[in-house]
Amino acid sequence: MSLKHIFKTPTPVLGVVHLLPLPTSPRWQGNLQAVINRAEQEAAALASGGVQGIIVENFFDAPFPKEQVDPAVVSAMSLIVQRLQQLVPVPIGINVLRNDAHSAMAIATCVGARFIRVNVLTGVMATDQGLIEGRAHELLRYRRELGSDVQILADVLVKHARPLGSPNLTTAVQETIERGLADGIILSGWATGSPPSLEDLELAKAASGETPVFIGSGASWENIGRLIQSADGVIVASSLKRKGNINQPIDPIRVRQFVEALEAGVAIREATLSERPTVAVS
C-alpha cells in the first residue's frame, strides 16, 4: 500500500509525539504511566488539530545509541503505540532513535503501525553518536521475512549529521530511492527546528520522481505555505508545542493553525498549476 493510500491525502501533515524518557534511558523517571499519559495527550491534540498521521519517537531518550536500543525501549514503545492506536483514528508511524530501523520495523509490524522513519537508510553519516552506516539491505530483507507492508520514510543527508565526503543531493535522493528502496524521502535542515532551503526541496523533488518528498524539520505556520510548494508532505513537531518550546506538550490550537496554513499553501499551488497554459501537440 502506498503512502498516499495510507494518509488518504496527497499532502499529509505528520505530527510527532516526542516520548518522555523511556526505561534504561539516562533521564528515565521510573514511571511508565506518566509517559503514556503524556503521549495520549499529545496524540489527541494532534488528531483533533487535523493531522493526517502521527510519528512516535523516543526523542527524550538522548543521548542515543547509534544503532540497537535496549529491549525495554522496544517493549515500552510497542505498548504506547498500541494504546495510541486505540485513541486516535489517524495512521501511526515509528522512529526509534538514533537509527534502530530493525526495532522500528518489528514494532510497527507487530502492532499494525503503517510506516517507520529511518534517519540513515543508505550511505555513511558522521553524528554525535559516531559513524552511522545505512543498512538498507538488512532492513528490506527483514521486512520481507516479517511479511510486512510497513512503508519506509528515509531521511536524505539527515539533520544533526554530516556525510562522509561531499555527496550531491540529487544523487543522494536517487540512490536512497533506487538502491535503498525507500517509499518516501525526508529532507531536513541542519538541526531540529531548522527548515530545508527551498532550493534543496526543489532539487529533491526533481530527483525523486513519483516518490513523495517530506519536509523533515523547521516547518511552522509562518513558512509552511512557502515550503509546501516544493514538497508532498511535512513532518512537524517543535512549532506545535506550547510557546514553540520543544520541552512543552503539543498545543491543539497551534496544530489547527499549522494545518490551515498548509491547506492555504496547497490551494495556492493548485491554483498556480491550473493557470499554467497547456501546449498543444500537433
Image (tube, rainbow, N blue to C red):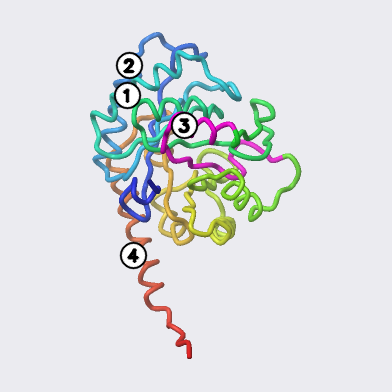
The residue beneath circle 3 is 95
Report whether residue 43 is seen: yes
Q: What residue would you read off at disc 4?
A: 267
Q: How many other residues sit within 10 Å of disc 1, few (<14), some (14-19) or many (≥20)?
A: some
Q: Earlier in the sequence, mark 3 or mark 2?
A: 2
Which residue reaches farthest bottom? 282
Q: Can you give x and y, in whole percent of width and height, for residue 261 in the image?
A: 34, 55
Q: Is residue 78 left or right of residue 187?
A: left
In the rendered image, residue 148 lying in the magenta stretch gets the answer: yes
Which residue lies under the disc numbered 1? 38
Residue 241, can we see it? Answer: no
Pointer 2: what residue?
A: 34
The residue at the point 45 percent across, 48 percent down is: 219
Residue neighbourhood size for the residue with mark 2, other residues' Cα within 10 Å, grouped as few (<14), some (14–19), many (≥20): few
- Residue 128 location in percent, x, y? 65, 28
Question: What whole-number distance in Å separates the C-alpha atoms at marks 1 and 4?
Answer: 34 Å
Cα–Cα gap, marks 3 and 2: 20 Å
Up/down of 111 relative to 156, above or below: above
Q: Is residue 101 above or below residue 49?
A: above
Task: Give the magenta range.
Answer: 138-163
Is residue 73 on the magenta stretch? no
Q: CA distance from mark 1 to mark 2?
A: 6 Å
Pick whichever of labels 2 and 4 is earlier in the sequence.
2
